[in-house]
Image: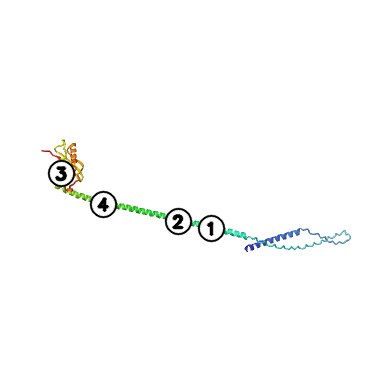
Amino acid sequence: MTRDSKNIVPVSMALLLHVVIFSSMIVAFDYARPTPFTPLAVQATLVPEMPEQAPPPPVVEPEPEPEPVIEEPEPEPEPEPEPDNSEELRKQAEEEKRRQDAFLEQQRLDELKKKEQADKKRKEREEAERKKREEEEKERQRVAAERKREEDIQRQREENERLRRELEAEQRQAELDAEERRFTARNSAEMAAYQFAIAQKVRRNWAVPASAGPETKCSVRVTQLPGGEVVGVDIISCNGDAAVLRSVEAAIRRSSPLPKPVDPDLFDRNLTLNLTLERED
């Protein structure tokens, strides 16, 4: 209805313009036609010639005015029927709807893409935070385990040190007790008998060389096992020559095993023997 009401004004203006142009053409055509010649009726009276009087001027009758031409208005042309553009409008509406749907679909896809990207970034951020927490937890556990290991090592060291001190204390105490017993035993008759038995056995196995003087004296440290086996001979001092030294060492080794003491507390792993070659009267 809006389209029809808007078309009436242009059509009316076009018709009015055609009427004006047509009227102008008719008027121009009437002015261009030749005016028909109408003979004038002249009435004359014959008079005698009067040379001294001029003839009167001819009377000219006015031409009759032309009858006005009444132009009949041309009938207004019937308005042309509006073209049927419903199909074109339908196609335009469909095309517009398609564009609108495509625009909305693109908007939806863009929003979906933005949401997916935001979700992806959020998941990546959460995954990074999770890995960071895991790394921090692993580092915390590693530090705790390392600290516990160091504490265990330190505790074991302290325990070992305590046991060592206790063992050393026990050993020192045992050595003190044994030394005290040996000290007591050395001053006893049993110790004197034990040392005399060892000296007698060594003297019996001592082949004194000819180079030994009548006042030969040798001090020897003997290392023995609990069974009396001699495992070491170290001459501390001796006033004899090399032959005497060799004879003393050979005599001690031939005396192995040495006599055992009656009291086990009298046993001394490291004995000091004093051998003296006295002059016979």
Provide the secondary structure element on which disc 4 rests.
Answer: helix
Q: Which residue is mark 3?
A: 197
Q: Quadrant of the C terminus?
A: top left
Is residue 135 shown above or below 211?
A: below
Name the residue at 26% across, 52% down: 163
For marks 3 and 2 on the same chain, the one whose residue lies earlier in the sequence: 2
Question: Which residue carries the number 4 mark?
Answer: 163
Q: Earlier in the sequence, mark 1 or mark 2?
A: 1
Q: Amino acid at mark 3?
A: Ala
Q: Nearer the viewer, residue 89 or 37?
A: 89
Question: Where is residue 73 shown, x and y percent of the image?
Answer: 72, 63
Q: Gap in Å between the C-alphas at discs 2 and 4?
A: 58 Å
Sequence-first disc among 1 and 3: 1
Q: x and y percent of residue 77 in the render?
A: 70, 62
In-front residue for pair 236/206: 206
Mark 1 is surrounded, within 10 Å at the Cα level, by few (under 14), some (14 to 19) or many (20 or more) other residues, namely few
Q: Which mark is residue 105?
A: 1
